[in-house]
Image (cartoon, rainbow, N blue to C red):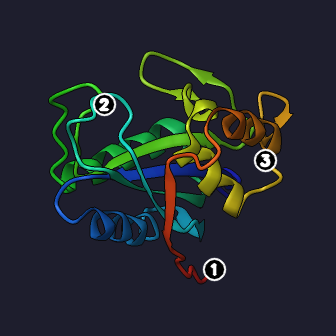
Amino acid sequence: MGAPHQLAYIGLGSNLESPIEQVREALNELAMLPLSRLVAASSLYASRPVGPQDQPDFINAVAALETHLSPLALLDQLQALEQQHRRRRQRHWGPRTLDLDLLLYANAAIDTPRLRVPHPHMTARAFVLVPLAEIAPSTHLYQKPLSVWLEHINAQDSNHGLERLASLTIRA
């Protein structure tokens, strides 16, 4: 018998080449990853870019994945999907066809040159916290309920700069 499955949360984002379709296609591809099962996906959200503002708005979502893959093996799979979507890393926080971030992996705290989990910027990003709360409202980050982080984001920007676009139906 293999390793037990772990619950991982993946942040998805795109702002190039039909971003809604890029994110929807990536969700379908996540559902086909080896030793893994897509168990939930948030609605799609439009958000302003982080960093340079001379680029289109992003489409974002968060997905929950049950996986037997190790964190680094999962990261390899996510980066392979980004490459299939012709991701180019030309500018920090620049435009991209697909961005897949491993946000959380079970209760693991990982800090290596290649991977940091929990994702180091997620508590400051409404485009991660709002969709995460939609599919996993009881999540804790750094020993605090997700609701505390959302309240902090609300205090800074009441509408988060987000627009909810569409709900997705994932059949487990």
Q: Name the amino acid, label 1.
A: Ala
* N-terminal label among 2 and 3: 2
Q: Nearer the viewer, residue 41 or 81?
A: 41
* Location of residue 2 with respect to 157 vertically, above or below: below
Q: Nearer the viewer, mark 2 or mark 1?
A: 2
Query: In the rendering, at what x and y percent does residue 90 appear?
Result: 14, 30
* N-terminal label among 2 and 1: 2
Query: In the rendering, at what x and y percent does residue 160 appear?
Result: 57, 46
Q: What is the spatial separation of the Cα atoms under label 2 and label 1, in whole angstroms?
A: 33 Å
For image coordinates 85% across by 29% down, the residue present is 143
Query: In the rendering, at what x and y percent does residue 36 appear?
Result: 54, 62
Q: Residues within 10 Å of mark 3 (few under 14, many from 20)?
A: some
Q: Are marks 3 and 1 in contact (CB under 8 Å)?
A: no
Which mark identifies residue 139?
Answer: 3
Please identify the quadrant where the N terminus is shown: bottom right
Q: What is the spatial separation of the Cα atoms under label 3 and label 1, in whole angstroms?
A: 20 Å
Please identify the quadrant where the C terminus is shown: bottom right
Q: Name the amino acid, label 3.
A: Thr
Residue where numbered disc 2 is placed: 93
* Left or right of 60 on screen, residue 145: right
Q: Describe the element under mark 3 as helix, strand or loop.
A: loop
For image coordinates 67% across by 55% down, the residue present is 5
* Left or right of 50 on screen, residue 110: right
Which mark identifies residue 55?
Answer: none
- In terms of image quadrants, where is residue 76? top left
Confirm whether residue 69 shows in the render.
Answer: no
Q: Nearer the viewer, mark 3 or mark 1?
A: 3
Residue where numbered disc 1 is placed: 172
Q: Describe the element under mark 2 as helix, strand or loop.
A: loop
Q: Nearer the viewer, residue 122 or 155?
A: 155
